Image (cartoon, grey):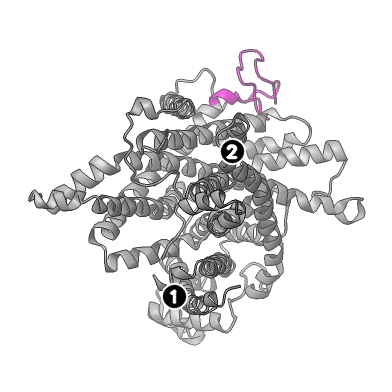
Amino acid sequence: MKFAAVKPVSRVLARELAVTALLLLGVSVVVFAILYLAPGDPLNVLLEGQSPRSELALGMREALGVPRTWYGQYAAWFGKMLQGNFGNSIRTGLPVLPELARVGVYTLTLTLGSLTLTLLIAVPIAVHAAAHGGTAGNTAATLGAYVLSAVPVFWFGYIVVYVFIHQFGMFPLISGTAAKQEHAWLYFLVPIFVLGIASGTLSEMIRHLREELSRVLAEDYIRTARAKGAPVWRHAFKEGFLIPVTEIMSAKIPFLLGGAVIVEQVFNWPGMGRMAWQAAQDRDFPVIMGIALVAAAFVRSGNLLQRVIFTAVNPRASRE
Amino acid sequence: MRRYVQTPGPIGEFSELSLAQRAGPLDLLYTGYGLLVVAVVVASYVLGAFGWLSHDPQAINVGLINAPPFTSGHLLGTDFLGRDLQARLILGIQAYFLPGLLAITISVVGGSILGILAGYKGGWFDTIITYFDNLLDSFPRLVLILLVIAAFKPDIYYVMVVVGITGMPVIANLIAGKIAFLRQKSFIEAAHALGLPAHTVVLKHILWLNCRALLVIQATLGMAEAILVETSLSYLGFGVQEPTPSWGNMVQAGANYFLQGNFWPSTAPALAILATILGLQLLGDGLNNLLEGKRRK
């Protein structure tokens, strides 16, 4: 670790933290704006059968302490959120944030697991293609990745479930007997497998890694290294591998979170995606708002991490 | 703020080679297959729109449920109510065709405007638009769509507006990158030196002459995204509802019979989704290699 790299990282960290905070503020404004523009007034539920325009409605607002202006409402909502109060679910009445923390772990396992799997598939193909050019095998692998990326993930899930039932005779998660069966842990890998293969990120990951790596391998300093007999891989690693990998990983997190909504539905996986689906069914605003905010925070932290790695590897970037 | 842009190939490099010299066999294969898919989808859309179908897509025949392909006049078999799968697949295109066009129109128009503001005007616009892009990229699209569905109503056109808006940043970035490249080549300076007004430079020289291929490619990829979103939502039950067919709700309806070993009613629409999305993505990439002049020896 070079000492020269230490200072820029802290500087960039401070800047990126500020940017992240600003973006998360923007995220909260977007979420609030969507709900603010939505038709209907939640208060009408309380005033069922009575005229919403009456004095009663106004009195009700006063009594509940609902601010009259939109910015007042936003400030009140945002202030509560900073204290960790995301409201209570309309359906279950439970506070949103602890619920999200409970199910978020499952979604985190699912997304990070499938991201790892996608990388494990994409990296060897991309590295091989970059190093050896367009051989028949490489073309076939790339084409195969294209096809896999276009497979609808919800259908692929059924295929895998079918194979598991008929080849391994396992029904867990569907009948809820997972704990009693042998090799039950295997079944928890199935949704990860499905999302990792068919989330639509595979072909793009291969393409990005291959193009970046072949670009770097064609650079002059690699040719020099090669001529000197120095290890090419070590010279190409940072710019040709580490940076593109972290870049594509952070760029694909939102896609995986979106894919998780579907995969969790197919496999009854008790995560945030299923909760989002349920909340959209029930028009459970506090829950779906909380999920959107938590998901955005997750995406931004992935991005922040990528920026930190990028700067640590390439300190010059901090002076741009 | 450097960021990863979802783009195949380098931006703006002009190739010295002619189109015929540049075209690799794979690019032609991709493009050919993609064009075939587009032709089939458009033709099927027209057939469905005018109701020129060989079978009534809603005619229930309980005597012939989950029939395999090629049974008694049903070319692609029947579903769990004995309805003709071929007619339902063709009619299912209605669910995404016009909404998808709306989404890509929004992305292309909005993305072009943002890209020109960022690239041509630059300065503060560039900063603001970069933040706007990052803001939109922060949301998983499906979560944002579910939020809109919860707030408004599960209407496909509302959803497609969201898809269109979330598709804008990619196009804006590509156009801004293209303009930066043209500036580097003194292209825009030269146009100004000729005394051309700004709107001519932007509309004709930047958008029409230099960005039209890029916009067509992005529209193709955007349509694939729109189909993916529509089928996913129909699968989740927020899109088109039974008995109106959509490829997504057909997969969902057939899935109950899937685990009993009856693959076909769920697999046929899944293959239609697969073939169409694959075709559009390959078309986008093939055109990108052909028209955007990826360097090729």
The chain under label 2 reads: A
- Indicate the amino acid at tag 2: His
Residue A292 visible within the image: no
Q: Which residues are magenta?
A: B59-87
Residue A69 visible within the image: yes
Task: Answer yes or no: are tags 2 and 1 on the same subunit.
Answer: yes
Q: Which mark is residue A132?
A: 2
Mark 2 or 1 closer to N-term? 1
Give the quarter of the figure containing the N terminus of chain B.
bottom left
Which residue does the image show at 28% across and 52% down from the upper left? B179
| Pick the front one: A110 or B230 | A110
| Pick the front one: A315 or A10 | A315
Left or right: B255 in relation to B83: right
Q: Is residue A312 above or below residue B84?
A: below
For the residues labelled 2 and 1, say whether their Cβ atoms are less than 8 Å apart.
no
Which residue does the image show at 51% across and 49% down from the upper left? A223
Q: Is residue B10 above or below residue A292?
A: above
Look at mark 1 in the image and give the residue it sits on. Answer: A22
**B85 falls in the magenta region:** yes
- Indicate the amino acid at tag 1: Leu
Query: Of all residues shown, which one is farthest toward the front?
Result: A228
Q: Is residue A68 above or below residue A130?
A: below
At mark 1, the secondary structure is helix
Q: Is residue A63 above or below residue B42?
A: below
**B88 falls in the magenta region:** no
| Pick the front one: A155 or A48 | A155
Magenta residues, dominant SS class: loop
Query: Of all residues shown, which one is farthest toward the top?
Result: B72
Give the image location of residue A226, x and y in percent: 56, 49
Give the distance between the C-alpha atoms of the residues marked 2 and 1, in whole angstroms: 44 Å
- The number of numbered badges drawn on the structure is 2
